[in-house]
Image (tube, grey):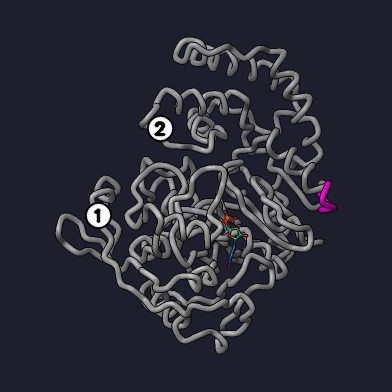
Amino acid sequence: MDPCSAIVGINWGDEGKGRMVDLLTEDFDVVVRYQGGGNAGHTVINEYGECVLHLLPSGVFRPGVVNVLGNGVALDPENLLAEINTLKEKGVKITPDNVKISNRASLLMPWHRKLDVLEETRLGEKKFDTTKKGIAPFYSDKYQKKTILAGELFYPDVLRPHLNDLREWKNLILTGVYGADPVTEEEIDAWLEKYCEPLKPFIQDTGAYLTDANRRHKRILFEGQLGALRDLDFGIYPFTTSSNVLARYAPIGAGMPGVNVERIIGVVKAYSSCVGAGPFVCEMFGEEAEHLRQIGGEHGKRVRRVGPLDLVATRYGVKLQSTTEIALTKLDVLGKMDEIPVCVRYNLDGKEIDDMPFPALVSRCKPVIKTMKSWKCDISDVRSWWELPQEAKDYVKLIEDSVGVVIKWISVGPERNSIIRRG
Ligand code: GDP
């Protein structure tokens, strides 16, 4: 099998992966999402304007690129259909020729979202501040073997009793544990008709499709969601997502377990941001945080916590992702600061450490800060390494030396072409 490539997040997510996939898809034939679901929000700015992608791979804008939602994805029909319709209205072509959904992807059901909301409400102050998209209930059901595969939509005689069994079980939890209303058969029938029927033409055996594409030497790119620190097994558990975001997992979630991921592009943001609860060692507060949020445009639906670049977390993320090259995004933002703090190490109970500690210890760490000079000017029009101010080059070099992987792209703006290519 030909080796494949991946674009993945190195930090907590929101690094600008969508923007990099949108740029680099000119070199690929197929883009595959292999995990996660509607909890992703990849922002892409191109000839169609500003588009936020939740489930669709960021290759949808490129004519000729085939986009696959693999078996590892949390397939939320409601969310996906809304996204398809929004993009179609903007003039983006979406047909079964360029979007393919795995028949082995599990369906995220209406009860998953309900349970997410109910559990977060029950937790009160201790909530995880989830996206409330039903992701954790979905993946726990998948591991319990209590989900419906997309391909079952083609077999009503299998689907009907399977759905009834699951609904009966879910209603015990909804009513008995949370005191909520049960889900009726009529509600589910209406949901199937409204959201699943229109998706049926897109569903197929994408594993077979990808294997064949690979045999024909098509260039395949895996698009990760979130960042390494949110990986279920290796992130800051339990403040992780409920799936494996790592590039090494991509072939499994994509549907071609035997393939090798040779080129892994890790996306690192020039400063840190994190959404949701959990330890965030570098967090800034007050006016300082508000300033960074404002210059970085860090305003999502949920509050984005911000701070300086965390080299401990970045080194860990780069290693976890087996990163072979780095894309550094949002460097332009830091030109608006007077000086640039960077976290080079952690202080854990009085001892300085270079490596990420066990999750339970992360909240006890304090950042060890080094202050770098800012270039204090707008670099958003710069397109070559040589034109960058020396202070910006020093900043890039500091990261490169610290993580030991080459920074091949430097993004200096959200638009497709606001990029510096090195080497
Ligand atoms: P993703 O989930 O990793 O794709 O990242 P998001 O889409 O959540 O966040 C990236 C945000 O930063 C989006 O609003 C992008 O348009 C924007 N962005 C990406 N790269 C750059 C950059 O180099 N400079 C600036 N100023 N904005 C960028």
Can you name the residue that lies furthest to the left here? 350
Q: Secondary structure at mark 2?
A: loop
Residue at the image position 76 percent from the left and 49 percent from the top: 99
Instruction: Using the image, determine if residue 311 lies above or below residue 177.
Output: below
Tell me the crowding category of disc 2: few under 14, some 14 to 19, or many 20 or more residues within 10 angstroms, Cα based.
Answer: few
Q: Amino acid at mark 1?
A: Cys
Q: Main secondary structure of the magenta part?
A: loop
Q: Secondary structure at mark 1?
A: strand
In the rendered structure, the answer to whether residue 129 lies left or right of residue 209 reads: left
Residue at the image position 75 percent from the left and 40 percent from the top: 203
Quarter assignment of residue 134: top right
Q: Which residue is mark 1?
A: 365
Residue 352 x/y as whole percent: 19, 64
Q: Nearer the viewer, residue 2 or 407?
A: 407
Residue 368 x/y as whole percent: 26, 65
Residue 183 x/y as whole percent: 62, 14
Residue at the image position 44 percent from the left and 49 percent from the top: 231
Can you name the residue that lies furthest to the front here? 287
Q: Nearer the viewer, residue 292 or 192?
A: 292
Q: Amino acid at mark 2?
A: Lys
Instruction: Using the image, determine if residue 375 lies above or below residue 124.
Output: below
Quarter assignment of residue 36: top right
In the rendered structure, the answer to whether residue 202 lies left or right of residue 33 reads: right
**Bounds of the magenta segment:** 89-94
Q: Can you tell which mark lies on residue 127?
A: 2
- Sequence-wise, the earlier of marks 2 and 1 is 2
Q: In what quadrant of the picture does the C terminus appear?
A: bottom right
Q: Is mark 2 within 8 Å of ligand 1?
A: no
Residue 390 x/y as whole percent: 46, 86
Q: Would residue 253 be seen by someone viewing this image from the given angle?
A: no
Residue at the image position 76 percent from the left and 44 percent from the top: 84
